[in-house]
Image (cartoon, rainbow, N blue to C red):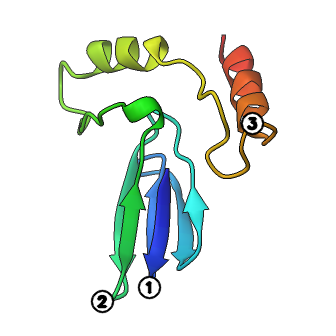
Amino acid sequence: MLGVYRGSATLRLGGERGRNVAMDAGDVIVIPAGVAHQNIGASDDFGVVGAYPGGRQWDLLRGLPGERPKADDNIAALPTPENDPIYGAEGPLRKIWKSARERSK
């Protein structure tokens, strides 16, 4: 999860052919594991905080040869978050991710 606390930025989600998303102070985005994301431009005062569910640690991968098999295993081993980090236990995140996982099988 990323939360913008100051300024603005444009993020690219999904790699080189991905989608650009504008973010401003107060915006929050939940990025599923394995989704490439990049800051492609930001205001001088841009400030962002990141958090991972359950105290998990990030692993920065850049798509280099040999990274993919371990990355796929790590992503598959992650549980669906217990709560929606924005809306809590009754929020839509778990339902959305469950549906997406079922479609990808």
The earlier-in-sequence mark between 1 and 3 is: 1
The amino acid beneath tag 1 is Gly
The 10 Å Cα crowd at callout 3, few under 14, some 14 to 19, many 20 or more, is few
Q: Nearer the viewer, mark 2 or mark 3?
A: 3
Q: Is residue 38 left or right of residue 62?
A: right
Dot 1 lies on which element? loop
Dot 3 lies on which element? loop
Mark 2 touching mark 3, by CB under 8 A? no
Eyeballing the image, is 69 above or below 67?
A: above
Q: Which residue is mark 3?
A: 89
Residue 86 position in % (x across, y down)? 66, 52
Eyeballing the image, is 30 above or below 10?
A: above
Q: CA distance from mark 2 to mark 3?
A: 36 Å
Eyeballing the image, is 6 above or below 14?
A: below
Residue 101 position in % (x across, y down)? 67, 19
The amino acid beneath tag 3 is Ala
Q: CA distance from mark 2 to mark 1?
A: 7 Å
In terms of image quadrants, where is residue 28? bottom right
Mark 2 touching mark 1, by CB under 8 A? yes
Q: CA distance from mark 1 to mark 3?
A: 29 Å
The amino acid beneath tag 2 is Asp
The 10 Å Cα crowd at callout 1, few under 14, some 14 to 19, many 20 or more, is some
Q: Which residue is mark 2?
A: 44
**Label ID, residue 7:** 1
